[in-house]
């Protein structure tokens, strides 16, 4: 989203990455660097990639909410119909599942910027926040605010990931019609033709309701990511300059 891509952190990374490309990737016929990367150049690349991964997942949250509407009739490879209720449930699940991944990517970015020396798999909540580079800093505050913003989505995310697909009472009513849509029974066909317009209106109302519930939470998550960028900008610039001086 523009709020994050226009953030001073991303703009600084963009300038540094552009300078890196001009300096190291001079041969336009190859993606290989013309020389071995220096430590500050590796640092820029690592932080840029980790930052972009975080922005991308925020973009995907926006897409998931936008794509709640826009259903068009499609079939799976075996010919089975993907119904409107199937489509809506899939998009809602996408939002829930991706939101909690934002914290994981934020921990990886913090590790990159502050040079904690952890592998991606080691970037766990307690390990990162208890490190001396993070503890009692603005980065810790920003990470805790992000974790708090994500918290409303944790329970439904865990249910989806570990127990079963997402559903609620309103969606179950739409799913009943979906079951009929998939049925080869002739009587079911008559019901579908008679009530398809009604269920389409109900589906649109459901999408509007879910958007009004999901959008504010996603907005808070993205604001918290912006706060993390605020906290990491100066440490990033200091880390790059320190490494450049040592090179």
Image: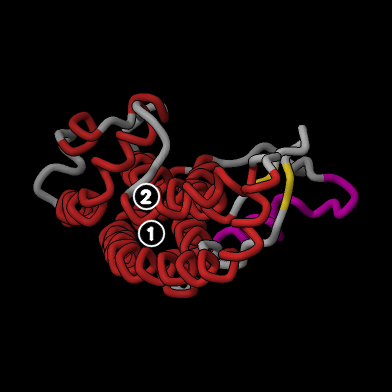
Q: Secondary structure at mark 1?
A: helix
Q: Position of residue 217 (x, y in %)?
A: 28, 63
In the figure, 216 relative to 221: above or below? below
Magenta segment main secondary structure: helix
Crowdedness of circle 1 by 10 Å Cα count: few (<14), some, many (20+)?
some
Instruction: Give the Cα distance between marks 1 and 2.
Output: 28 Å
**Residue at 29 percent of width and 58 percent of height:** 228
Quadrant housing residue 33:
top right
Question: Which portion, as a residue range, is magenta?
Answer: 15-30
The residue wearing badge 1 is 237
**Residue at the left extreme of this rendering:** 136
Residue 67 shown in magenta: no
The residue wearing badge 2 is 99
**Residue at 34 percent of width and 62 percent of height:** 214
**Residue at the front extreme of this rendering:** 187
Taking 15 as reference, is 140 left or right? left
**Residue at 48 percent of width and 48 percent of height:** 175
In the figure, 246 relative to 208: above or below? above
């Amino acid at each position: 989203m523009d709020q994050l891509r226009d953030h001073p952190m991303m703009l600084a990374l963009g300038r540094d990455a552009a300078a890196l490309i001009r300096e190291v990737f001079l041969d336009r016929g190859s993606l290989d660097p013309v020389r071995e990367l220096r430590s500050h150049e590796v640092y820029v690349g690592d932080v840029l990639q980790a930052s972009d991964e975080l922005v991308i997942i925020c973009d995907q949250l926006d897409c998931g909410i936008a794509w709640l509407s826009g259903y068009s009739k499609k079939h799976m490879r075996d010919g089975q119909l993907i119904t409107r209720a199937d489509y809506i449930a899939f998009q809602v699940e996408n939002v829930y599942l991706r939101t909690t991944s934002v914290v994981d990517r934020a921990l990886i970015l913090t590790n990159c910027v502050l040079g904690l020396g952890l592998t991606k798999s080691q970037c766990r909540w307690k390990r990162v926040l208890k490190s001396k580079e993070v503890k009692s800093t603005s980065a810790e505050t920003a990470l805790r605010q992000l974790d708090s913003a994500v918290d409303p989505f944790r329970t439904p995310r865990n249910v989806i990931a570990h127990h079963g697909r997402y559903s609620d009472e309103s969606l179950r009513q739409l799913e009943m019609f979906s079951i009929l849509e998939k049925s080869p029974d002739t009587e079911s066909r008559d019901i579908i033709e008679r009530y398809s317009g009604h269920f389409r209106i109900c589906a649109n109302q459901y999408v509007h309701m879910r958007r009004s519930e999901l959008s504010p939470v996603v907005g808070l998550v993205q604001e918290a990511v912006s706060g993390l960028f605020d906290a990491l900008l100066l440490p990033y610039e200091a880390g790059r300059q320190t490494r450049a001086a040592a090179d």
